Amino acid sequence: MASPSSYRPAPGSIPTSPGVYRFRDAKGRVIYVGKAKSLRSRLSSYFQDIGNLHPRTASMVTTGASVEWTVVDTEVEALQLEYSWIKEFDPRFNVKYRDDKSYPWLAVTVGEEFPRVMVGRGAKRKGTRYFGPYSHAWAIRETVDLLLRVFPMRSCSNGVFKRSAQIGRPCLLGYIDKCSAPCVGSVTAEEHREIVDDFCDFMGGNTAAFTRRVEREMYAASEALDFEKAARLRDDLGALNRALEKQAVVLGDGTDADVIALAEDPLEVAVQIFYVRGGRIRGQRGWVADRTDEGGTPELVQDFLLQLYGGESDSIPREVLVPALPPDHDVLEELLGERRGSKVAIRVPQRGDKRDLQQTVATNALQALALHKTKRASDLTTRNRALEEIQQALGLDEVPLRIECYDVSNLQGTEVVASMVVFEDGLARKSEYRRFVIRGVDGQNDVASMHEVITRRFRRLLDEQARSETVATDSGPMLIDPDTGRPRKFAYAPSLVVVDGGPPQVAAAQQALAELGLNDIPVCGLAKRLEEVWLPGEEDPVIMARTSEGLYLLQRIRDEAHRFAITHHRGRRSKSMVESMLDDVPGLGEVRRKTLLKHFGSLKKLREAEADQIALVPGIGPRTATAIKDAVAKADATRKTAPREPAVNTATGEIQEDD
């Protein structure tokens, strides 16, 4: 790896103008493309002490061997050039949202004498009207199949059309009334054009007029006793309604918009987009990409919009709804407006239907990211590679087949708890998870709490090993309890101990093991802010590659330990609050308090419950239920009037609201 100082531009040689820059590696390949309002300010930020850089940025500048730039006149030109270079060079350190297919569209060749409806992909052609985009081609074909009975326009290829015209006999669609058969002169070009115009109006959102017209014709045929025609029109109306059900109205104002949401973690980002045209959802797509720099949500949104709309002018809607405004949203709006040919607005919805729809898209993004992680974790080859990468990065003697991770959770020093999660062969072993209540530490002291947890867990290991040795067999110590027939779970020593935190937590865990005489169990820590892996006694962290499966596995283990600790902490917090709230209720002991909390599941649901609902809990009658309701109301009134500081979860830094 090259030192950034070896190719740092001379002082004063970098212009202060806006422009686009490229980092190249030793072989001349472009590894990163970026833009800047001031090239000097931006590029100078890369050539500072590597220890001050984000790990992904540090990896990029140490991989690079040279940097070059191009000055442009405006920020819009910089955006355009950045997109062009990203498409041309495919840099490894730029976020890339990949998809294996182009957009599928519903296309109507209005420029032909007898227009045809079909599925279109790729570049758009002049003389063709497009609707969509859709998420899948089959979704377009289903919609078209339903509508052809109402709008029997041509859908066959040119070859089929000419062949039918030559033999004087229409194709199958003509016989089943899903085509008006212009090929054999059943309708004139003008009559067929009217059918096509009606179809395009319906797809363009003018649906109510057609459904009302079909209804009127159906009732008129029924009154004229033409029941065969009325039945056919009834079926046509059903086809229209089924087509409309596939495109439910989500925005009543008939907006054309793309609704975008992100789900992110330190290593990956999932993007979901809903295409809304005429107020109806016409399609949905999603991507998952590796994160390659330290940019937050606004930067990720900007990168995505540039890649999404950089080469597609016809697909840009009037409005783009995003979770966060990109840093240069004014410039981006100007660029998209130039490509579209009219004004484009980039907005963050704050309320109403648009806000609700974006929350739905965000839910889809979260599910897509979770599914991606599940598929990634379930692959045997990937898990093996992850364990081998951890072994190599940490210098372990053997592959860590059993990894235990520990996390501490508390709220301003109260209800301090810890979690232990176990992964074997890269998969979670939830039956071996353990919870701890910290008893030997007063107040908020995560380091001392970690020391206590490690001490208690591994003292139990030594006790279990001592017990098993007393009944050892020729094949070695017994790991099965002879009394219960179950495995002695604490008798298994982990191949690696991971703690959630940096050097202080790692040092505390190492010290606890040393005090117990266990010097052969490796320890590391994973700091959440920068995803740095720390080893005991090391001044610098171990930097694992951004694409490393080993780092991904460590992160997943750490996040699982954090989730398990938070769940335990919230449960104890709800329990203690219920107990303190109901202390003055006569006849309500510990057993019935536990039953009450188990029945409602949380303090929030207990607050919302009425007295008659509380009385349904086994062992609690109407009088006790009324007393409980009064006690809850009194506690809530006291809580609302008493001044209090915001509660902060010291494990996550988040402000906590009462359940």
Image (cartoon, rainbow, N blue to C red):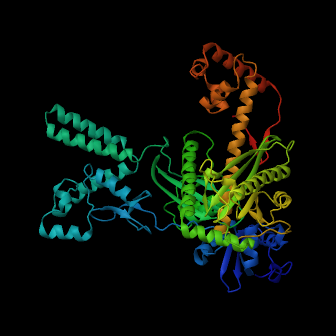
- Of the 4 image quadrants, the one containing the N terminus is bottom right
Across and down, in percent, residue 221 comes to: 18, 36
Left or right: residue 271 compared with residue 33: left
What residue is rendered at 61% in x and 78% in y? 89
Q: Residue at x 47, y 46 (%)?
A: 279
Q: Is residue 321 left or right of residue 162?
A: right
Left or right: residue 34 versus residue 157 is: right
Q: In the displayed image of the protein, which residue is found farthest to the bottom?
A: 27
Q: Is residue 590 above or below residue 104?
A: above
Q: Is residue 301 visible?
A: no
Q: Pick whichever, 494 or 500, lies toward us.
A: 494
Which of the 4 quarters of the picture holds residue 98?
bottom right
183 w.r.t. 44: above or below? above
Nearest the viewer among 441 and 242 is 441
- Residue 503 screen position, x and y as percent: 83, 61
Image quadrant of residue 520? bottom right
Q: Quadrant of the C terminus?
A: top right
* Horizontal and vertical percent position of residue 488: 66, 53
Does 373 appear above or below 3? above
The residue drawn where x is 79% and y is 46% is 650
Location of residue 414 in the rendering, given as x and y in whole percent from the top left corner:
81, 39
Q: Quadrant of residue 557?
A: bottom right
Q: Nearer the viewer, residue 502 or 451?
A: 451
Question: How many numbered discs sit on the rendered protein?
Answer: 0
Locate residue 362 relative to residue 177 in the image: left or right.
right
Q: Is residue 274 visible?
A: yes
